[in-house]
Amino acid sequence: MPIVMPVVVSQAAGANQAHRDLEEKLVTRLMLDEAADVRLIGPMQQLQGNSTDQVMLERITSDFILLGWHAPEESLRNLQALGIAARRAAHAGDRNPPLRSCRGVYFIDLTKLKSIDDAIAQIKACSANRANKTVQIGLSAPGPKKAAPPVTPSSPPTSQPAPPAAESPSTAERYVALGRNDHHDEPHDAVDDAMESLIDELDQMDL
């Protein structure tokens, strides 16, 4: 896993050649093999305000890893003496730091490491821890799903029988109606009676 944080290596005070060799090998491996963003500064307790090393540390605005030859508490005091706000970030080599609300520094005490491989392993563990926290912060918790509005089943349209069409009278019924003679129910008038009597008389005369 790539190292995603800046790495600062603070040199040991004095002319201890063994310390110098370890520092050089560590910086070279971080730069060439791990492609890390690594910076080398002088001994923490000897840094002065407005020095190049102090300005470089101030320009690191994110969390970073600091390897030095002191315990985390002393390294933190040295940073604060330079006016650099920082807090101890918890990791395998510094499990119980006090909680503070500023950028985190992963302090690694070089006096407790057995080899360069051990130092690289701790650096990668700190970087992985920082990357996991960034992912967790970036992922927002899914909000509660809105309940879908209840679906009211639509009532099927009531099928009402169409009113029966008015039946038209059949042809026979129309003929009967037209040919019906209701005059036999009406009384004959006087003219009709006279005509019938005249016809009867003419018939008798012919006889």
Image (cartoon, helix red, strand yellow):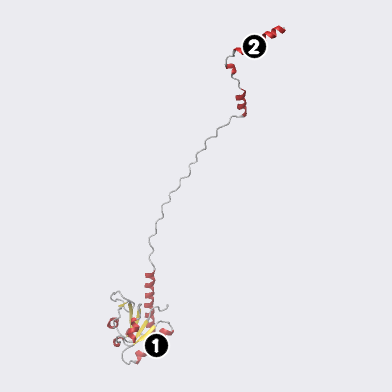
Q: Quadrant of the C terminus?
A: top right
Q: CA distance from mark 2 to mark 1?
A: 156 Å
Q: Amino acid at mark 2?
A: Glu
* Apparent side of residue 163 relative to residue 79 in the rendered image (left or right): right
What x and y, as percent, mark residue 136? 38, 70
Q: Which residue is mark 2?
A: 196
**Which of the 4 image quarters holds residue 55?**
bottom left
Asked whether 24 or 54 is in front, the reply is: 54
Q: Amino acid at mark 1?
A: Lys
Given contact means CB atoms under 8 Å apart, are the residues at marks 2 and 1 in contact? no
Residue plotted at (34% across, 82% down): 57
Give the answer, above or below, for where 207 lies relative to 110: above
Residue plotted at (67% across, 9% down): 200
Give the answer, above or below, for where 70 lies relative to 202: below
Dot 2 falls on a residue whose secondary structure is: helix
Identify the mark nearer the N-term, 2 or 1: 1
Asked whether 56 or 1 is in front, the reply is: 56
